[in-house]
Amino acid sequence: MTPEPFVGHKSIAQRLRAVLLQPLRLIEAGLLVLIGMSSAMLAVLVVQLPRTASGLRASAVAAASSSWVEAWPQYAWLGRPVAYLTHSAFSLTAALLALAATLPAVGGSRHAVGSGIPEMKAIMSGYWLPRYLSLRTFIAKIVGLTSALSAGYVIGKEGPMVHLSATLSVLLMKLPPFADAVDTHHTRKRSMLAAACAVGVVSTFGTPSAPAPPKIEPTNPRCATSRN
């Protein structure tokens, strides 16, 4: 006797056919692809900007030291202190820019402060923080994070990338193709936020094939998953 097939089992082809036959599923899939691609480009930006700033700082330090030696050869021994001062001035400027990104008085946002994971846990638990996922906070977070990294601070990017990916997903959900289908539906919106948080973790470590629970766990205290 052949064993009866498991009723709850669905092949990949069946799942793909179910998605293609439901316009809502297509919209959700399109939004997920858009969130993934946008978060990946954002992660590249967060990595490349500090690297570019570090290169500019090194060039400025070398140029200042060599210019000093050429202009005042009798004080060539001051070339090294000049290089230290140039390096410190560059780093201090970047640090002040990072600080300004958190001050509302100069166009920043106080919601850009911190890691982002505790606040996302609160949001995923049902306590909505609208300003925490706004465009102003998104821009301030990018400026603050890249400026702090450019200043030479050792900062973990996992929490900020989770926050940025979640904010990016909320902004994308307000676009016309997704506003009616996802943004106005609480359950779908929360599912997209959970997926965006997982994308943030993936973008930080570059591990798209990692198991799902470690990606979801940092922001979802219940780690609720579904077969459907």
Image: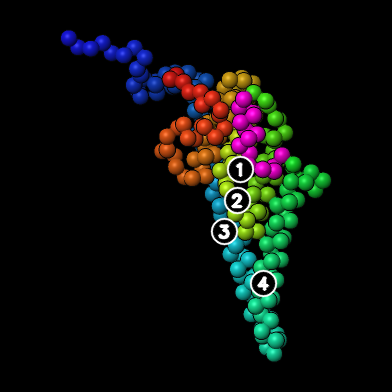
- What kind of residue is marked 1? Pro
- What kind of residue is marked 3? Arg
Say which quadrant the C terminus sits in: top left
Q: Label 1 belongs to which residue?
A: 160
- What kind of residue is marked 4? Tyr
* Disc assigned to residue 145: none
Q: What is the number of callouts on the image?
A: 4
Label pair 2/1, CB-CB below 8 angstroms: yes
Q: CA distance from mark 3 to mark 2?
A: 14 Å
User: In this rendering, which labeled residue sits more in front, label 3 or label 1?
Assistant: 1
Residue farthest right in this picture: 105
Q: Nearer the viewer, residue 177 or 149?
A: 149
Question: What stretch of residues is rendered in magenta?
Answer: 111-125
47 left or right, relative to 143: left
Residue at left offset 66%, top offset 74%: 83
* Disc assigned to residue 84: 4
The answer to whether one can see residue 80 in this image is: yes
* Disc assigned to residue 51: 3
Q: Indicate yes or no whether the magenta region holds residue 203.
A: no
Q: Label 2 belongs to which residue?
A: 155
Q: CA distance from mark 4 to mark 2?
A: 23 Å
Say which quadrant the N terminus sits in: top left
Q: Regarding mark 2 in the picture, which secondary structure is present there? A: loop
Q: CA distance from mark 2 to mark 1?
A: 9 Å
Badge 3, how many Cα within 10 Å: few under 14, some, many 20+? some
Q: Regarding mark 1 in the picture, which secondary structure is present there? A: helix
